[in-house]
Amino acid sequence: MLRCTLLLAALVVPAAAEAQLCAGQSAAIAADGRAFGHLPYGDAPLDELVATPAEFTIGQPCIVRRDILPDLLRLIAAAQNDPAVMGQIRGLSCQRSIARQRSVFCRESGADASDRAISVAPPGYSEHSTGYALDFAVRPANGCPDAEACMAATPAARWLRANAPRFGFEQSFPGGNKQNVKWEPWHWRWVGTSGDAPGAARARFVFAKARSLYPADPGIQPIVVRFTAPPPIPVIAAPAIDSRKSAADAERGCGAFAMGPSGPSYLSLAAVSAIRLP
């Protein structure tokens, strides 16, 4: 009997969810859907992807969602015209499909998945697959390898931190983030300067959980709607009433009119009560 009970319990209790990564490897999925700290994301539709200018890219073509392109081009132009950048801001890695992410994540077959996830998101858990995120690089690099923390000290990276939000970009993984993802000063996602910007509503929907649980820094601040209470209604004090006059008025109000030789006359309540009817 005990054996049957244990077997039934094993069938009823759900198994812990796991994300399939590389061949023979998987990762436990946290209660909020994360794998190794990263939230899940799907692929961007192919018909919504466009290429950025060739001079902006480094290596592979930089492909992004069509909605990003206007703000990205404005950011590039602003950086080119600002001497404080002291170099060029380029696109290192942009949209990556889940299949491409799997090839990148799984290319070191002997490495532990949790170790690889420190620098590369697992397939199906990268913001890059959405087409709304990209990694910036700085040229000249001045000895700092791409996608390393030393980038944050460059004038171009400091310019990005101060100005990228003006163009709808926010830094997904700031230092010490509660998502427990490696600090990535080069990685930025686009959510639009406001929710009314073309395409911004969809981007904000895609990143809604990330923005709510693990805010970007710097981030695009939400619009705060403040309601102003209406002014209080003035209270007008009632006029004082003479109690003696009020009693007389009450008695008069309870009287009656009678027709006399000279016309109608008013009879008080006492007079009315004294009248005897035949």
Image (tube, helix red, strand yellow):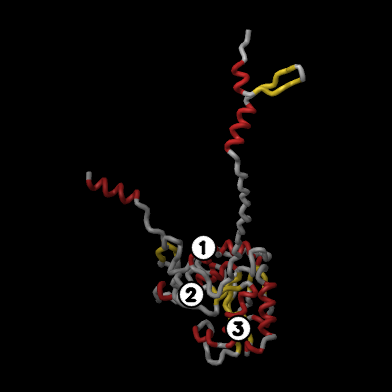
Q: What residue lies at 57% left-to-right and 63% top-to-bottom?
A: 206
Q: Which residue lies furthest to the left in this view?
A: 1
Locate the N terminus by quadrant: top left
Residue 225, position as x, y percentages in the image: 61, 61
Q: In this view, does 264 lie to the left or right of 243?
A: right
Locate the C terminus by quadrant: top right
Q: Residue furthest top?
A: 278
If you read the primary sequence from the N terminus, does the residue marked by circle 3 or circle 1 appear first? 3
Please tell me which residue lies in front, 251 or 185: 251
Label 1 SS = helix
* Residue carrying label 3: 159
Indicate which label's residue lies in the foreground, 3 or 2: 3
Residue type, mark 1 in image? Lys
If you read the primary sequence from the N terminus, does the residue marked by circle 2 or circle 1 appear first? 2
Q: Is residue 3 left or right of residue 11?
A: left
The image quadrant of residue 239 is: top right
> Looking at the image, do the residues carrying marks 2 and 1 touch, with CB atoms under 8 Å apart?
no
Position of 7 relative to 60 (above/below): above
Q: Which residue lies furthest to the bottom in this view?
A: 142
Dot label at residue 245: none
* Residue carrying label 2: 120
Label 2 SS = loop
Indicate which label's residue lies in the foreground, 2 or 1: 1
Please tell me which residue lies in front, 241 or 17: 241
Q: From this viewpoint, is residue 228 visible? A: yes
Q: How many residues crowd mark 2 within 10 Å: few (<14), some (14–19), many (20+)?
A: many
Residue 266, position as x, y percentages in the image: 69, 23
